[in-house]
Amino acid sequence: MDHAKPRVLFLVTTSEWGGVQNFIFNLTQEMLRRNFEILIAAGGDGELGQRCAEAHLPYLKLETMRREISLFHDMAALHEIRGVIKQFKPDAVHLNSSKMGVIGSWAANLEKVPRIVYRIGGWAFLEQTSWLKHKIYLWSEILTAVKKDIIVTVHPADEALAKLHHIQPRRQIMTISNGLDLEKFDRALLSRETAREQLGLMPEQIVISAVANFFAPKNIPWYLNAIAQLSDLPDTVKFVIVGDGPERPLIEKLHQDLNLSRRVILTGRKKNTQSLYRAFDFFVLPSSKEGMPWALLEAMAAGLPCIATDVGACRWMLEPDAGVIVPNQNQTALAQAIRALLADKPRSEQLGRAARLAVANRFQWQTAVDKTISLLID
């Protein structure tokens, strides 16, 4: 190392705000306090770049990086990332998201970066997609694993799945779960009255929330069809979906076709989502594919009774008594679970208390930070 401070380059496919971007944004602020030099580089014009500018975090937009598979753009992104590495000269590269795991590991190896760490929030080959894409995603992980020193999964089942498929890095594969700083989280929470006012909700309403980017794995169209089975609920029961994304036209059309305008409120994206959880009475995560979802973790921290589909880390997060797990893609089971919690206030309150306690005992931010940083330095 020919410079005083250790340098770490964080690479992520897209700057559109989500769990990965939230993790990088908070981790890098802590690393600056610990005397690291960092640079964040991501594709697109999403919220990550804006937030980094506001927080004075070093940030670079990758002009050629795309989420979609494209030989032309992918080769251009490889060349662009190599240039970033040559200029920044990192001691370690921290790769985030599946596509960056492939392209970034190639670039870092070609530039002989001393340490390459890949953090995967959820394996892309678990998405509901075509047979061909499934094989491409799986073999991309297998073939490029040897170009990474360490692979970090966010829950034990993904680590076990990697070993089953022989996704084996040069040094080790390990699990570091997501975590929350509860004191900071609590300080940011708005009062119930203020949060409801910001969302246009009435005090007497019972609010069932979901927080999700409008991407296919978040399964919002499926969720709307499940809500349509609950048309007999009192008018005071409202479903609020906070988020936005490329599936919005599809979701808005279905919202209209199912005649859900009086029952379901689509708020759009909210930059202060983390501060709004006191507005809600329940939380639902309807995803068809997840890693370890931040929105569920935040809802648990807020003490909300949670219902989640049995994907990714959800069962591991909520069992044995911190929430309700329903089978993936079973709309009737989800609708029944919602009815059951609405009808059983004592059980709902107990689940909320247990969810909060699970975050406090099992999913601490400082633990995630310390373990992650230890992987980036000798």
Image: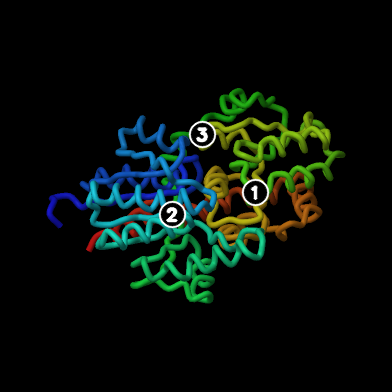
Q: Is residue 376 above or below residue 304?
A: below
Above or below, 217 against 53 in this view is below
Going by the picture, which residue comes out furthest to the front?
72
Q: Secondary structure at mark 1?
A: helix
Place residue 61 in its image quadrant. top left
Within 10 Å of disc 3 (Cα), the crowding (few <14, some 14-19, many 20+) is some
The amino acid type of the residue labelled 2 equals: Met
Q: Earlier in the sequence, mark 3 or mark 2?
A: 2
Picture quarter with the C terminus: bottom left
- Marked residue nearer the N-terminal end (1 or 3): 1
Amino acid type indicated by mark 1: Ala
Tell me what residue is drawn at x 71 percent, y 38 percent: 251
Most foreground residue, 342 or 151: 151
Q: Nearer the viewer, mark 2 or mark 1?
A: 2
x and y percentages locating residue 270 in the rendered image: 55, 31
Across and down, in percent, residue 307 comes to 67, 51
Residue 275's disc number: 3
- For image coordinates 64% across by 42% down, the residue present is 210
Front residue of 126/292: it is 126
Quickly name the residue at label 1: 216
Near mark 2 (Cα within 10 A), the count class, few <14, some 14-19 or many ≥20, is many
Distance between mark 3 and mark 2 Cα atoms: 30 Å
**In-image side of 370 versus 326 (left or right):** left
Q: Which mark is residue 155?
A: none
Give whichever of 6, 185 is nearer the camera: 6
Q: Residue placed at 40% from the left, 60% from the top?
A: 118
- Which amino acid lies under the numbered mark 3 shown in the image of this protein? Ser
